Image: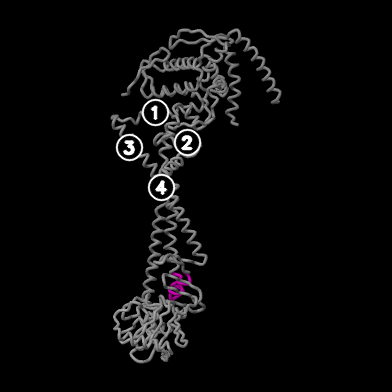
Amino acid sequence: MKIENTKAQMRKGVLEYCILSILKNGEAYPSEIIDKLKEGKLIVVEGTLYPLLTRLKNEGILSYRWEESKSGPPRKYYQLTEKGNGFLKELEVTWDELVNAVRLTSK
Amino acid sequence: MNQTVTINISGIVFHIEVDAYEELKSYLNKIKSYFNDSQEREEIMADIESRIAELFSEKITQMNQVVLMRDVQEVIEIMGKPEQYVTEEDEQEETAEKTQSNRSGGEKKFFRNPDERVLGGVCSGIAAYFGFDTIWMRLFFVMTTLFMGFGPAIYIILWIVIPEAKTASDKLQMKGEPINIDNIGKKVEEEADKVNEKLKNINTSKVGHALEQFFAGLGNVLKTIFLAFGKVLGVALLMLGLLLAVWFLVGLFDDSIILTYTSSGVSALESGAFFELVFSSEDQFTIFLAGLIIVLAIPIIGLILGGLKMLFGFSTNNGLGISLTILWFIGLFTLATLAIIVATEHKANEKISAVKLLPSAYHAYALKANEDNVPGELMLEADEFMIAVKDDRFYCNELELTVEKSETDSFELVVVTKAKGKTSKDAMGRARAVDYHMQVQDSNLVFDRFWSTLKEHKIRGQQVKLVLKLPVGKTIYLDDSLDGLIYNIENVTDTWDHYMLGKKWIMLDEGLTCLDCEDIEGVSSSELDSVLTKELSISGN
């Protein structure tokens, strides 16, 4: 078992939660999301994000709207749907549980 | 100066250098190949392209209006390679979605392999299916073509029946690799590399290219055939070498036996004992053995090395071959020198004669050979020539008997012994040492087939010649057992030795005459009458 694999698995689960958390504060377009995720060292390459956003959108958790950009192609601004909000709440509960579990077990 | 192309990414126009464009295109194609669901793929690709356009726009300035290779590489680094972000979960979902079409993933299927082919890729396809090296399959076809002839027919049938592996998933199935994103991606990448290679290799002239390809193909076919032949030859050489090596070692450490080939076929001789009789000293014999081993062993080593080389294609350094060759010539030189030394010991040639008086009371004598078995242990048998050893003596049948007219009334046997040596004294001593026996029992003369001498005298051209001096008027009967012993007996009818056997012969003034031959020529009837009367009176007694 490679340590890299394990790290990737852990990061992946948290990734969705983090994306939804970012969007909780309002809509954002991918570059903004990427900047925040990079800041938190959650992703290394940008390509990671796009399939994930598309899948979340297809599942009805996210929606987007187009907006013109001055410096490039039009941008997709993503936001949480109602379903997405519920989904995020569930994740928050799970996250708290996990943090609790880690704190307890790693003492 | 570099050529640029114009591209449209997400509705924005960019000028991009050609090589940068190729790189970008293959990158996007690779990402595409990672997503199976077409609707999802379109959307993801649009998002990614739009992000790439954004990144490019940041790089375009008033000064630098063209997208360069460096820019593309930077963007790829930012976006990451698909294998870096298409996670296992996605993979599972996608394969789950596609279970129906992908159920055969991991199962093997027969395909012809277009990437590794000489003719139709049948051999490499089968080899890929069974998972062994293509060369064995090709070798099999070459062998069946050469030895049984049905190879081409089978090949053509298989060529028609087995489909060619066209897509990446075909090629994966051909090798039985599971069809998943990683593998397909790898395949697509490989293909792209190949296409690029081909594009680079395209020559200005298309005809030239086609011809070149044809000859390259022909060359490959020939090369494969030669390689296959090489392997077959290699195996043959190796087998022969090993066989000879075993024979050689057995001969060396066991009762060394050398097979000699003579006109009468292959016969065996015990080399050690024989050569002891040839060489005058122990040292000579040892040197001879060393020379013989070198001269015989080196070609055997050469065969084995050559076979291994052909079979496994490894190369030995030249030094080994050269030193082996030099050593071989040294061995040959040693043997030649010994041969000369031994030849000098045959320089002088001497003979001695001994006369033995035989009882002259009888009119008729019967001549026979002693049919006893070979004395001692037979050591060498080549054609009619035999040598046997017993205790400290050796026995030889180098012996001949002839009949001549006696100048006197006495009936006698002259035993002439010949021998060779370094000096005449040496040769004389050797001739004297030869011991020959024959028995006289009444009118029966029984000749031994062998003479003997001490081993220490060695084989030096010793020979015994018997001359029977027969007085006129006496009759001899030549028994069949004398075959091979009598030699060139002169007679009035010039009858050959072999046909003189089993007949009675009388010595007349003219020479030896046949008494009971049916077709006698050259004898006057009156003479014959008188002889026959005499003969009758003898038998009447």
Distance Cα–Cα, label 1 vs label 3: 21 Å
Looking at the rendered structure, the secondary structure element under dot 1 is helix
Query: Mark 3 and mark 2, same subunit?
Result: yes
Instruction: Identify the residue at horizontal 37%, vertical 39% (top origin).
Output: B220
Instruction: In the rendered view, tell whether residue A27 sits above or below residue B504.
Output: above
The answer to whether the residue labelled 4 contacts the one labelled 1, judged by CB atoms less than 8 Å apart, is: no
Looking at the rendered structure, the secondary structure element under dot 2 is helix
Count of numbered marks: 4
Distance Cα–Cα, label 4 vs label 3: 21 Å
Determine which of the numbered discs, if any, sits on residue B126 in the image: 2
Q: Give the mark nearer the N terminus: 4 vs 3.
A: 3
Determine which of the numbered discs, if any, sits on residue B230 in the image: 4
The answer to whether the residue labelled 2 contacts the one labelled 4, judged by CB atoms less than 8 Å apart, is: no
The answer to whether the residue labelled 3 contacts the one labelled 2, judged by CB atoms less than 8 Å apart, is: no
Instruction: Identify the residue at horizontal 34%, vertical 91% (top origin).
Output: B408
> Within the image, what quadrant is residue B380 found in?
bottom left
Horizontal and vertical percent position of residue B395: 46, 77
Instruction: In the rendered view, tell whether residue A64 sits above or below residue A100.
Output: above
Instruction: Name the amino acid, label 2.
Output: Ile
Determine which of the numbered discs, if any, sits on residue B195 in the image: 1
Q: Main secondary structure of the magenta part?
A: helix
> Which residue position holds label 3?
B215
Which region is colored magenta? B271-287
Distance Cα–Cα, label 2 vs label 4: 22 Å
Does the stretch in magenta take in A10? no
Looking at the rendered structure, the secondary structure element under dot 3 is helix
Horizontal and vertical percent position of residue B256: 49, 66
Instruction: In the rendered view, tell whether residue B307 sits above or below residue B101.
Output: below
Horizontal and vertical percent position of residue B25: 41, 22
Instruction: Name the amino acid, label 3.
Output: Phe
The answer to whether the residue labelled 2 contacts the one labelled 1, judged by CB atoms less than 8 Å apart, is: no
Using a 10 Å C-alpha cutoff, classify the residue at mark 1 as few (fewer than 14 neighbours), some (14 to 19) or many (20 or more): few
